[in-house]
Amino acid sequence: MENKNDKIGIDEMAVFCKRKGFVYPNSEIYGGMAGFFDYGPLGVEVKNNLKNEWWRFHVTSREDIVGIDGSIITHPKVWEASGHVGSFADLMLTCSKCRKKIRADIFLEDTLNVHADGIKAEEVNTLVKENKLRCPKCNSEFDETSNFNLMFSTTVGPKGDDSSTAYLRPETAQLMFVDFKLVQENARLKLPFGIAQIGRAFRNEISPRNFLFRCREFEQMEIEYFIHPEKANECPYLDEVKDYRLNVYSAEMQEKKVETKEMSISEALKKGIIKTAWHGYWLATEHKWFVDLGANPEKFRIRQHIAVEKSHYALDTWDLEYEFPFGWKELQGMANRTDFDLSQHIKHSKQDLSIFDEESKKKIVPYVVAEPSQGVDRAFLVFMFDAYEYDKERGNVVLKFHPILAPYKVAVLPLVNKLNENARKVYDKLKMKFPCFFDRSGSIGRRYARMDEIGTPYCITIDFDTEKDGSVTIRDRDSTKQIRAKTDNLNSTIRKLINREIKFEEAGNPVKNEE
Ligand code: GAP
């Protein structure tokens, strides 16, 4: 049943994504596998578009960041050095009778409506006892809470014993530290600089849920940004963002239980709310990336981690949060990791990963002052939610994607079957440049509606005048306005529209809208 509201919940989004071919539950014909998903024909296009756009914005359009593509399985010592073997764990509650296992913090948040991120084992046990909490499945008591390491392990080679145990990476980040020295030398990088990577990460989540929000296999787009340890406030790009405004929710505001406050980056820095210029720069830059691609700025805030939440490696962490239908949640983590990782790898590998600083003529171990770490699947959800609109007048869903993210940029629709041949000529030219859809079945209104529902920004109709005057009708998805444009320069017109170089009205002569 179609949801006819503007706002939809996460389960309805999962249903919509499956129905339209964006995302499927993994191995559904065998009953499914919790925490794993497959992107369908439309989903893979949107996901690739957003990854390409992330890479363009963060890597190829900048001089100070280069990329790598590291392997998923690495030497197990990488994860001992990083601290993941010892402490990458969530607290788990196990039922004493049916053995059901639940992630403790999420269970407490759901049942007691408390903030339980970073909660300690003793506190979990106390809260469970005090509130007489029981297993939601069989109503029996829980055992004492225990730690559950989230890394997936496997064995490498034919031995299959403990000595061959390896892990599927739980984050892409470590590869940037392990390859740090090679990359810095090969790319002849000088501080400050960053190394970026997009790739799969795996976490054996105790309670995967909320569709793509918390999965066991997902993708990350991460940057490790390295600076001189004494130059956390010397950010040459700060001017680009100093007036940029964000909704700020500091640790102090959370402790005092006051509302978020909108302020500029320079104000947050001046008041000491954001501690370093680099952190301010990256928070604004990451917010801007989402908003420039069509996300709704009202649904974002930056929230500082309170002391108990911080990861084992972090000095200060801010999350870029988004208001999902199930509440404000982390979209991107941005930790100040200092020299934790490089120092750990120096210690464990006994290799020199320091670099020579020309200015002080000394060897230094750089700091990672901010680590913009973004989940691809969470970003995908944001763009889906912000694009989704049920248009009551049209009687169908319209996915108002930024054209850059849309799976198809343009659809070619012959008005009647007789015009198929002419329409195919237009389609054949366009499809060499843009993902393009040819649709000749159903009424023109029905075809427009189908394109609205998958977010195609422009529909081109071929009619009886096309052959006579060499022009076509282009219809804009968001406004339903129509213009008449020449076929000769259609490729260039569509390119300019997709890149928002021209307004729709500038692309041709207005046509009376008969929808
Ligand atoms: N290198 C730092 C790091 O991995 P994180 O906060 O654990 O930090 C970064 O993860 C981002 O990865 C999160 O903000 C989120 O967008 C995404 N992410 C983490 N766990 C996820 C999961 N189970 N499912 C989907 N995305 C996840």
Image (cartoon, grey):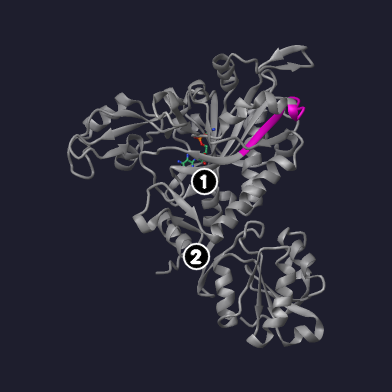
Q: Which quadrant of the structure image shows residue 3?
A: bottom left
Q: Residue at x 25, y 40 (%)?
A: 100
Magenta region includes residue 192 = yes
Query: SS of the residue at dot 1?
Result: strand
Q: Report whether 328 appears left or right of 504.
A: left
Residue 391 locus on image (x, y percent): 53, 70
Q: Is residue 114 above or below residue 344?
A: below
Magenta region includes residue 348 = no
Decide if residue 310 is in sight here: yes
Kind of residue at disc 1: Tyr
Q: Which quadrant of the structure image shows residue 214?
A: top left
Which comes sooner in the sequence, label 2 or label 1? 2
Q: Residue at x 79, y 65 (%)?
A: 492
Residue 375 locus on image (x, y percent): 54, 42
Crowd tier of the residue under label 1, counting other residues whose Cα lies within 10 Å: few below 14, some 14–19, many 20 or above: many
Q: Which mark is residue 495?
A: none
Kind of residue at disc 2: Lys
Residue at label 1? 322
Query: SS of the residue at dot 2?
Result: helix
Q: Which residues are magenta?
A: 186-197
Residue at label 2? 20
Q: Is residue 459 above or below residue 111?
A: below
Decide if residue 264 is in sight here: no
Q: Report whether 274 appears left or right of 151.
A: right
